[in-house]
Amino acid sequence: MQKILEFPEVLRLIEDRSAAFRAAIASAPDLDVQVPACPDWTLRELAQHLGDGRRRQAAIVAAGPGAEPPAKTDPKGALTAPRDREALDAWLAESTELMLAALREAGPDRGCWTWWGRSQAPETSGAVARHQIQEIAVHTYDVQLTLGAAQPLPTDVAVEGVDEFLTTVSATTVPWPFKPATIDLHATEGRSWRLTLDADGVRCDDLAADAEPGDQVMRGAASELVLYFYARVPLDGLENTGNTEPMERLAEWDPNE
């Protein structure tokens, strides 16, 4: 696999996407409108979710290795996002900084609880940080979409996001219960990956330049691929050749059931 981003760059991208999220929330005329990509939430509730989530991750990283996540506590005791716009912005900024401070203190290699123990991603604070970029980036897109001003994910975030999703969310050692298959993914920015689905589970590797095409081949901008992974755009919005059934099954399959 190609080398992932260095830890300082990961933290920088978290800061960048967090600032973009706050800017999008600040520009919203009404925070009580529904979010199309998250129809159970308003923009205000999405902001609450993002702030709560970063505070929760701060506690998880700070707790270090463990078989279970730490009990749900808020490190600042502020469980409800303020309704005042200026105070909300400050609360969101504080939420991000609490998580970043915990990550800086832990460094990239310290173990901590994660939900992806059977994936290819390590159970470390560095892997948590990688995943956080994508969660914040996709929810920033959600706010922009709600405001009618959706923008593609930045290229560095999106290319990193394809690799992170495939190794953290898609990969598993749980045996693939369907017909074995290979899925090739090509980002127009120049990276390519192969998912292998078989009795050993689901594995992600960089696609060799001389490899024969897989059973399914997907092409698109890295942002489009990430937004597909997170169910923000449909599969037919990407260029597909071969049999699309493997990816459709993978999207629906829960290896923990």
Image (spheres, helix red, strand yellow):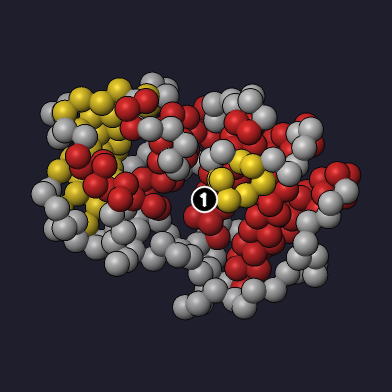
In the drawing, does residue 188 fall left or right of residue 24?
left
Please name the residue shown 24% across and 47% down the image.
249
Residue 136 location (% of width, % of height):
60, 45
Residue 164 location (% of width, % of height):
43, 45
**Image position of 89 with respect to 54: above or below:** above
**Image position of 3 with respect to 187: above or below:** below
Tag 1's secondary structure?
A: helix
**Image position of 42 with respect to 60: above or below:** above
Instruction: Kindly identify which residue carries mark 1.
Output: 131
Residue 214 location (% of width, % of height):
16, 33
**Quadrant placement of the C terminus:** bottom left
Disc 1: CA contacts within 10 A as few (<14), some (14-19) or many (>=20): many
Please name the residue shown 65% across and 55% down the image.
49
In the drawing, does residue 215 fall left or right of residue 251?
left
| Type of amino acid at the residue the image marks with label 1 | His
Residue 35 sits in which quadrant? top right
Please name the residue shown 51% across and 50% down the image.
131
Please name the residue shown 48% across and 65% down the image.
114
In the drawing, does residue 122 fall left or right of residue 102?
left
Residue 8 location (% of width, % of height):
62, 45
Using the rendered image of the protein, determine whether residue 34 is visible from the camera's viewpoint: yes
